[in-house]
Amino acid sequence: MTEVTRFPDDGLFGRFLRIFRHPLRALSMALATTAVAAGVTTGGGVVTAIVGAVLGVVAGELLGRTRVRLPTAFGAFVALGVLGLLLAALVTGSEMLAGFFGPANALGVSAMLRWGLGAFALVGALRVAGARYPTAMGLELGAVVVSVGVLFAAHRDGVIARPLWISDWAWQKGIDPADIFLALGATAVVILAVLLVLEIKSGRTVSTLVSLPLLALLAVACLDVVGRPMPQAEDGLGLTTEEQGEPPNQMPEEPDQNGPDQNGGDGGAQQGAQDSGAAGGHGDAGSDASGGLSDSGASGSGLDGGLDGASQGALDGGAGGQGGPDGGPDAGGGGGGADAGGDAGGGGGQDGGADGGGASGAQDSGTGGAGAQDAGDAGGATPDAGGRDAGLSPPPDLNQQQQQQQQQQ
Amino acid sequence: MLALLTPVYRVYRARVRPWLRRARDFFPLTPLGLFVGCFGSLALFHYGYQRIDLFLLVVGLVCLGLVAVSMVLSVAGAVVLAYRTRGRSSEDALNLECGFSRRTGFSVGAPWFVPFLRIGWGWVNPHVDVKLTRRGLRIEEEVTPTKRTLADEVRRRFEVGDTFGFARVAFERVEERPVRFLPTTGALKQMQVLRTLAAGDAISHPDGPAGGERMDMRHYVPGDPVRFILWKVFARSREIVIRTPERAIGPSHQTVAYVVTGPADEPAAGAARVAVDAGALGADWVLGADGCEGYAEDLRSAHEVLARSGDAAETSGGAGLGDFLKTATPGGLGRALVFVPARPGPWIDRVLLSLGRTKGDVEVVVCTDGVDRSAKKGGRWGRFLYRPDDSPDPAKGVGPASAADLAEVCRRLSAGRVRVLILDRMAGQVYSAAHQLASEAA
């Protein structure tokens, strides 16, 4: 059955906009090729790959409009790609050609042949398929997304400091690199969606192009509301498991004179006890993986910004009675640096780390009198420590602050 | 193995495939949408949440969001559109000529307030080329018939989807409306395909009509043709007398015309229409066509016969010619014109078989919309490398016949000892088959 369905015409402006789908596609393919080739081959190879990709778009589009069958076109592009590989191998493998060009030039010529003809063949084959069948456009656009995604793959697993060329620039501008990645993703998907819209005759090109960025913004906003994914700390030291460890040591019956926590023994370590006694409730600062404190504020509202508190989190860096908003997105796991990113810590408590804090966190909560907030997740050595802390009546000022924070949340 | 699979494929084609198509119409996701949905899920859940790839997180989220929005909008739009288009009917008959467009008056509201939603439709039956234009807040329909037909209803296929091509829901609606599409006449205004209308085989008889030889005489009256005046009589007698036909009887001189259906038979039907409209068949004629049980003897019924012949199966071309020649000319065949398509097919053997049993003056008119001399069969390699031609522009007819096809038709018909003419509907020219064969040989 032949396709009989027709759609309204796009109008003059819509037809005008549809002209730009070819340059936009060529630009997308050039960027994707750059993302793949950059850092892998020589500068000449990158340039040749870009040129090959653009020419591949043109050749594929023109070939798709002819009566040449698709397998025939595919075969031609595959043959061209294989030819590029063979020629590249010949240039570097043949003594005569390598001697003629010189070693450096031979490598350069080989890279140009390999990448130029390879990009031309691959992009041309994708384009000719997309020109014939709309479904195949998904492959084309998917290839672009994957190529660009590979370029930013270094930031996976929460390492937003990579790639350095993005994170350095972002830090210099005072922007969170995570926002940069989100913005890049939204831009990429909008561009690809625009390509789809311009390719399909719908009669609603203009209104769609207006609505599409709004939808992408809405998606990013939803992501902010729902919450971005956070990295899970490694369980190398067994600190993040929910398994109940050995029972805590028996605490002395006489009260601890160094700290306000009369009941004391919430499983905290000695270090935490000392901190709590000294500062009367320090904010936990998750330490960097290297062991250095990332944010050891001296004031009472120091930001807990520890990036990766995997193992050194027991060191309390925060000072003062209020932990303040924990800003480190990667904070978390280990030890006392359990104040996870995103959660505003009240006093020493409100540990948002999923795996709970270690010893010092529990102690801080005890000293700050906000141990009730830790009941759920401040496991540490004694999961019921928070419960015991909750039995204490917090000072009036802290109680008000907690209520305010709860209202804000 | 192949023989085993052939019946299976036939069953699949006849029974399974229609159901699959119908199921596909109601399944909202297109293959592209399915692909993007899977890709988005992989990007969102695996790379976005598990590997915390923020780039792919947004890509996956937006992809899945677009697919979901498209699906919801398409389904909702289809439900609304199906409700609004139900039970439509019109008494206004749609009389059109193939190749000429006209607005049908059918329109639906354009969902301008819903983003990403696109609505379109086409005609499943009859065959037309639909063009949709947006006028204000409505989408109006303009059709160009591509094949002659006679129908009582219009079956439309609506498609509601999104502007990305991720989702699509389709359904059909029937509108009760008389439809008659006549074949276009192209550039043909007159057609001189009959050699003569006078047979000269009448016998003088006082009871017969005055249709014999011009042997009688009478006085001239104003209005008589001057060329029939007997000037020698006038010179002798100074009286103006003219020759008049004597009373005579003879075999019927009815001209019969028949349209053979087949692939690309629109030019044949168009030529037959010109012959009827222009009076090229004389005063007494009968027209028949494949796919029609009766035959026409007046202009109105002739148009109906021509329109109805468009619904005949292409494979049954020429099957009714033998019976038509027997029933339509009981008094013996005078002259016969057979309009045939320019593409070879099984109809040739049937036509030759029917004409072989007929005694009379038979002319076969091979009708085409031009001749494409550049289109040569590429042989095995050509079929392997190239796709067949796309459907031509309906305003330009069925497209030119290839010179090879035309030559084959002429050659096979000429071998049946019938006179063959070639008629180019778009150029309005008539050639002899010998002319075509000679040019083909050159």
Image: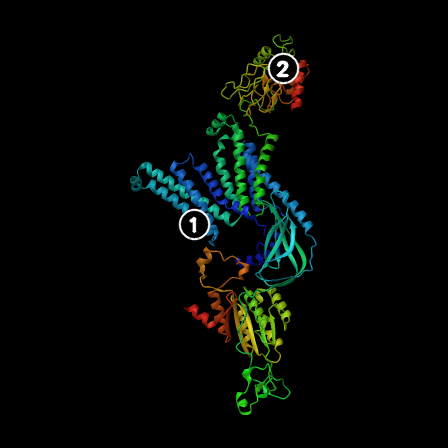
Observer-nearest residue: B291 or A195? A195
Observer-nearest residue: A221 or B239? B239
Q: Position of residue A216 (x, y in %)?
A: 57, 36
Q: Position of residue B138 (x, y in %)?
A: 64, 49
**Residue annotated with mark 1:** A76
Determine whether the residue tagged by mark 2 lies in a helix, strand or loop. helix
Determine whether the residue tagged by mark 1 lies in a helix, strand or loop. helix
Three-letter code for the amino acid on which mark 2 is drawn:
Gly
Height in image: B413 above or below A363?
below
Height in image: B357 above or below B130?
below
Q: Position of residue B46 (x, y in %)?
A: 55, 35
Q: Is residue B240 visible?
A: yes
The residue shown at (63%, 84%) is B209
Q: CA distance from mark 2 to mark 1?
A: 74 Å
**Residue annotated with mark 2:** A368
Counting other residues with Cα less than 10 Å from the Cα at mark 1, is it few (<14), some (14-19), or many (20 or more)?
Answer: some
Height in image: B206 above or below B67?
below
The residue shown at (39%, 38%) is A45
Of all chains, the one bearing label 1 is A
**Residues under numbered marks 2 and 1 in contact, where contact means CB atoms less than 8 Å apart:** no
Q: Earlier in the sequence, mark 2 or mark 1?
A: 1
